Amino acid sequence: MIKKQVFKNIENAVAGHTIITSNTSAIPISVLQEELRLPNRFFGLHWSVPAHTTRSVEIICGNTSDQEQAKWLYQLSHFWGKEPMLLRKDIRGFIRNRLMYALYREAFYLVENGYSSIEDVDRACRNGPGNWITFAGCFRWMDLTGVPAYHAVMQDLFPTLCNGTEVPKLIDKIVKSGGQGIINGNGFYQYTTEEARLWQETHQEFSYDIRELAQKYPEDVVKKKLELQDKDRSNADIVSLKLE
């Protein structure tokens, strides 16, 4: 594997205390660290695209990664303007991809079995979870909207969800016909050269806009509001004492 050799070369060129990371999105970290002299200092550092605007980064531990160094990376990533996620045990796909590919699989199932169109599945994603997921995440959202309801739905819905293990026929057909999405105008949608260019530009614009909005509502937004309330109460108490 080329990546293994690359990291062996890197290890030979850096100091023994240097942390080495990979942005791999599929190859398990445990596999990449197998042939290193000091595998405990090797981690996954999985960025989201575009990395300069998104808040997401995953710190991934392999089987022999040092947990204390992982925590250090976790804290460091806050200084990069990220809201990091720590994967304590290595698993293929990590956190984000496993969540997303479960969604992709169900999306293909709905389209390929005639339940919905590509366009309507996209609308459901944009206007369903797209309306809250940047703010809350799945577990917080269940807390906000009532946990028992989800418990009840899961009992009936989970047995009906797709659990297929094969690559969906729809994407297989596109790839085998040479489709690459907006890169060559042929994907789940068809694009002219100008449409492809504008979709790329608009995605860049959106990534900045959504980051600006998300920064108003960080994961500790309520904690900060509580701290501000406590500070206001303390100031009010001080003023009251002075008046007395």
Image: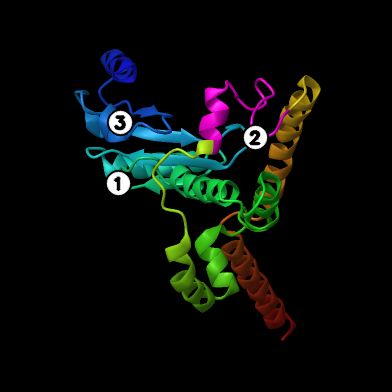
Task: Classify 10 Å Cα crowding around label 2: few (below 14), some (14-19), many (20 and above).
Answer: some
The residue located at (26%, 14%) in the rendering is: 12
Label for residue 42? 3
The residue located at (31%, 19%) in the rendering is: 7
Between 148 and 74, which is closer to the camera in this rendering?
A: 148
Say if 241 sits above or below 86 in the image: below
**Label 3 vs label 1, nearer the camera:** 1
Give the Cα separation between the discs numbered 3 and 1.
13 Å
Q: Amino acid at mark 3?
A: Phe
Residue for badge 2: 188
Report the side of 28 relative to 53 (left or right).
left
Q: Range of the magenta residues?
A: 170-190
**Label 3 vs label 2, nearer the camera:** 2
Residue for badge 1: 89
Quick one: SS at disc 1? loop
- Majority secondary structure of the magenta segment? loop
